[in-house]
């Protein structure tokens, strides 16, 4: 898949000065290495001789942040650091556990460091699929049930995991066995650019901080330029989103959510933009119909992939104006060769392309030469 408009600034090699003696390192004043602008869930702080990678929110309701000491050659000699929180960089053999991690590793040209992944059929990237098909990346179970025996045999330098509400049991088992574990909390970020900035998390682990900074800057610039372009339209098209997925409850983005931010930045009138909450709203069909029946566009109707599927689920969907005018757009139909949905993998890393998709759908004249990357008109 061609990724539009990402121009990476050439980067000089990072010069590293390493102390030759293993000795206690005096504390230095805190200094942020990479300026984290949008992301709230992590921080990179430079000390004398090493760097702290601080993950502030590894999962929902986490009681405390976790600090990892990253060093090049000599581990930091500090009394409050466990061996499993001292990680040598660059990490050479890594297991990631979410498809959202893969594009960030690829943009840093480090996919050859990947040695394991759960549920590999969901990977849509052609570059990483080649490695998987060649046996260079090992299947390590499922994302919520990793195969600890396989992982112990692989013995990677690092496993980048994620969890929803608590520490993952299989990851805890691996950690007790001496394998370094870091939780990635990018999915908890509340803004599109906040999630994309987690490429700097991988940048410091792979010792490619300057590359990560440059890549993110390009994505940020593209996003802001697209947002400005959207403001050239004086008319805000009305939008409904979501669908009924179970128990007659219509789920759609709350007004302060990550998805609602995309719609706002695309200069659209999302009909629930004034609601509270950063997650989803659970509403009745009747309430959604009363408010959204005449919406001009229907963006992301749940997991449905066709209008036929919508009608088979609920014939009343046909009463929506967007259904009648053939203005329903979904990201669920663009898939990799093994069935992985491109949006679920790449959208976190490339919010600039998501925003351009939304502008192209609702105000095509603003981006006459742009082709949709994630969304397609539902047939």
Image (tube, rainbow, N blue to C red):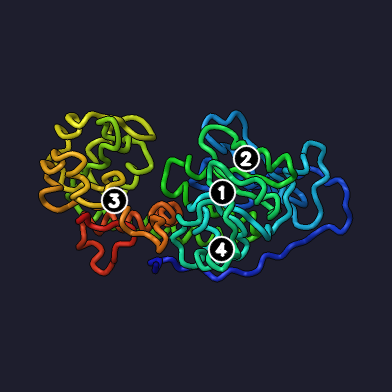
The quarter of the rendered structure image containing the N terminus is bottom left
Q: In the image shown, does 186 or 345 lie closer to the viewer?
A: 345
Q: Return the disc, 1 or 2, that comes first in the chain's sequence.
A: 1
Viewer-nearest of discs 2 and 3: 2
Q: Is residue 273 above or below residue 138?
A: above
Q: Secondary structure at mark 4?
A: loop
- State the residue position of label 1: 141
Q: Is residue 88 above or below residue 281?
A: below
In the image, taking residue 14 as reference, residue 213 lies left or right, namely left
Q: Secondary structure at mark 3?
A: loop
Q: Residue 62's spot in the image, x, y percent?
A: 57, 31
Q: Are marks 1 and 2 in contact (CB under 8 Å)?
A: yes
- State the residue position of label 3: 266
Q: Residue 183's spot in the image, x, y percent?
A: 59, 43
Q: Are marks 3 and 4 in contact (CB under 8 Å)?
A: no
- State the residue position of label 4: 108
Cα separation between marks 2 and 3: 41 Å
Q: Return the disc, 3 or 4, that comes first in the chain's sequence.
A: 4
> Any mark on residue 170, and which?
2
In the image, taking residue 40 as reference, residue 27 lies left or right, namely right
Q: Return the disc, 3 or 1, that comes first in the chain's sequence.
A: 1
Cα separation between marks 4 and 1: 26 Å
Q: Secondary structure at mark 1?
A: strand
Q: Say which residue appears at 73% left-offset and 39% top-offset.
A: 176
Viewer-nearest of discs 4 and 1: 1
Q: Looking at the image, how many numbered discs can be counted on the residues?
A: 4
Viewer-nearest of discs 3 and 1: 1
Residue 220 visible (yes or no): no
């Amino acid at each position: 898949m061609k990724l539009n408009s990402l121009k990476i600034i050439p980067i000089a090699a990072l010069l590293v000065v390493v102390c030759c003696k293993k000795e206690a390192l005096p504390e230095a004043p805190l200094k942020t290495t990479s300026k984290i602008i949008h992301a709230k869930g992590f921080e990179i702080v430079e000390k004398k001789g090493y760097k702290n990678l601080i993950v502030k929110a590894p999962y929902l309701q986490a009681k405390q942040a976790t600090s990892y000491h990253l060093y090049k050659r000599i581990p930091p000699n500090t009394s409050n650091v466990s061996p499993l929180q001292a990680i040598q960089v660059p990490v050479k053999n890594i297991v990631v556990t979410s498809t959202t991690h893969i594009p960030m590793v690829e943009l840093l040209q480090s996919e050859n460091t990947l040695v394991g992944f759960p549920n590999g059929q969901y990977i849509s990237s052609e570059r990483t699929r080649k490695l998987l098909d060649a046996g260079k990346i090992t299947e390590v179970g499922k994302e919520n049930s990793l195969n600890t025996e396989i992982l112990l045999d692989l013995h990677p330098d690092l496993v980048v995991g994620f969890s929803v509400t608590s520490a993952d049991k299989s990851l805890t088992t691996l950690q007790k066995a001496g394998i370094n574990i870091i939780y990635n909390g990018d999915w908890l970020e509340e803004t599109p650019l906040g999630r994309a900035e987690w490429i700097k998390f991988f940048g410091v682990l792979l010792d490619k901080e300057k590359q990560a900074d440059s890549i993110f800057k390009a994505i940020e610039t593209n996003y802001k330029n697209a947002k400005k372009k959207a403001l050239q339209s004086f008319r805000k098209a009305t939008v409904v989103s979501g669908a009924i997925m179970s128990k007659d409850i219509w789920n759609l983005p709350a007004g302060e959510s990550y998805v609602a931010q995309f719609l706002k930045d695309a200069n659209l009138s999302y009909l629930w933009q004034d609601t509270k909450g950063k997650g989803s709203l659970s509403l009745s069909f009747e309430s959604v119909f009363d408010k959204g029946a005449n919406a001009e566009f229907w963006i992301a109707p749940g997991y449905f992939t066709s209008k036929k599927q919508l009608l088979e689920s609920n014939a009343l969907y046909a009463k929506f104006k967007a259904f009648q005018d053939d203005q329903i757009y979904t990201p669920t139909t663009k898939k990799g060769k093994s069935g992985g949905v491109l949006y679920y993998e790449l959208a976190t890393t490339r919010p600039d392309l998501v925003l351009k998709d939304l502008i192209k759908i609702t105000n095509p004249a603003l981006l006459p030469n742009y082709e949709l990357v994630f969304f397609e008109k539902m047939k």
